[in-house]
Amino acid sequence: MAANTIPIYSKQGQIQWSGDLKTANTAKDGTGTVETIFTAGADGARVERIRLRSLGTNVATVVRIFINNGGSNAVATNNALYAEITVAATTLSETSALLTTNEFPSAADTTAFPIVLPPGYKLLATTGTTIAAGIKITAIGSTY
């Protein structure tokens, strides 16, 4: 299917999300345990922002975002470390909103998003430490 041109506009909004990110992965090359956040369609995609939400009580960690070229993430040359964000420790509460939201673009990295992905490329995520409740990552974007 031909993409919209002159100028290029997105065809359809996309909201995609990861599984529960819990298991530590200290590899900085995108190999090992990863969660897929977003996969570009046949004409590519644009990801405007990524939102991270703790699912309960967790220790502090770092979440790393990798760009994958659509190949196996087990091959390090298919992945590039793109962005990372520190996620503070959280304590679940049923009476107040204590579970903070982390988001890209962030104040520390204002230029990471939006990002345009070629057809079939993916955004992957890892966490630096094993966390109990996990983190859910949601990507907001569109396809071309």
Image (tube, grey):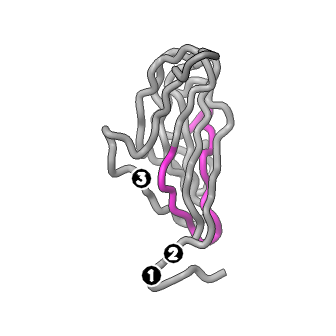
Q: Amino acid at mark 2?
A: Tyr
Q: Residue at x 49, y 45 (%)?
A: 66
Depth order, front residue of 29/115: 115
Quarter of the picture holding the C terminus: bottom right
Q: Residues within 10 Å of mark 2 (few under 14, many from 20)?
A: few
Asked whether residue 69 is drawn in magenta, I would say: no
Quadrant assignment for the N terminus: bottom right
Mark sitting earlier along the chain (3/1): 1
State the extent of the magenta-drawn residues as a range: 31-50
The residue tagged 1 is: 7
Residue 13: image location, x then y, percent: 61, 62
The CA span between labels 1 and 2 is: 6 Å
Q: Residue at 44% across / 81% down in the picture?
A: 7
Q: Which residue is mark 3?
A: 113
46 inside magenta stretch: yes
Q: Nearer the viewer, residue 129 or 78?
A: 129
Q: Residue at x 62, y 20 (%)?
A: 56
Name the residue nearer the viewer: 22 or 32: 22
- Nearer the viewer's eye, disc 2 or disc 3? 2
